[in-house]
Image: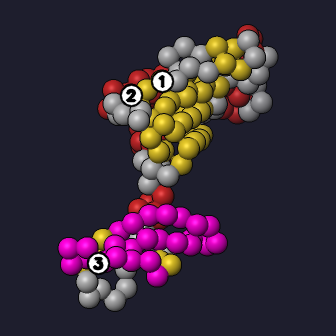
Amino acid sequence: LLILYARQSYKIYNNYYKLTVGDLNGVTVQSEASIPIGTKTAYLTLEDAIKEKFDKVLCDVPCSGLGVIFKKPDIKYKSTDAYKGLPSVQYDILSNCAKYVKKGGILVYSTCTLNSMENEKNVEKFLCENKDFSPCDFEIGTIKSSKGGYTFLPHITSTDGFFVARLIKNK
């Protein structure tokens, strides 16, 4: 919990103070909260203050690392059981990060794996459950995404293997 200090800017509205939040560790954050009159101290969480405030959010989630197996050969000796819970954790992170994207903003989801359960399937599930987001195609040089996502395959792109999806929050 972070304490955000109002810049002594408030209005009385229907027996509530309406506080406008000012500085957070030297960074100006604009947010409002309705606080009942008579309240001596008001606390807002960081989540309250920055919800739907960002133009772009990058979600680089923990993953199985199967796309970088050439650089980290020890990955191939891990049990696949170690990766079974990852898609759920990744999905939770993606869903949480989505709260901070403002309307018209971009949410980027990335992994360093080639596992479709961690990549396309997570994005498909997210889009089904979050109708306020849509895939947003992108181009990087000669690479063109499809349905907002692209899997970088080492033998085609001469890069590590990884996945990127670009999603836009509808206005």
Hey, which quadrant is residue 166 in on the image? top right
Q: Magenta stretch: dominant SS?
A: strand
Amino acid of disc 3: Ile
* Whether label 2 touches label 1, CB < 8 Å: yes
Q: CA distance from mark 2 to mark 1?
A: 8 Å
Q: Is residue 145 visible?
A: yes
- Residue holding disc 1: 135
Q: Amino acid at mark 2?
A: Leu
Q: CA distance from mark 1 to mark 3?
A: 42 Å
On the image, the x and y values in percent for residue 49 come to: 45, 63
Could you tell me which secondary element the residue under label 2 belongs to? helix
Residue drawn at (44%, 64%) of the image: 31
Front residue of this view, candidates 125 and 2: 2
**How is colour applied across the structure in the image?**
secondary structure
Query: Is residue 19 on the magenta stretch?
Result: yes
Query: In this view of the protein, which residue sits in the foreground, 11 or 157?
Result: 11
- Mark 2 packing: few (<14 Cα in 10 Å), some, or many (20+)? some
Where does the image place residue 16, in percent across and percent down from the top left? 25, 76
Where does label 2 land, which residue? 127
Residue 73 located left or right of residue 92: right
Circles 2 and 3: CB atoms closer than 8 Å: no
Q: Earlier in the sequence, mark 2 or mark 1?
A: 2
Image mark for residue 12: 3
Callout 1: SS: strand
- Residue at image position (29%, 86%) is 39
Residue mark closest to the camera, 2 vs 1 = 1
Alpha-carbon distance for marks 2 and 3?
40 Å
Instruction: Sort mark 1 into few (<14), some (14-19) or many (20+) by Cα contacts within 10 Å.
Output: many
Q: Which residues are magenta?
A: 8-33
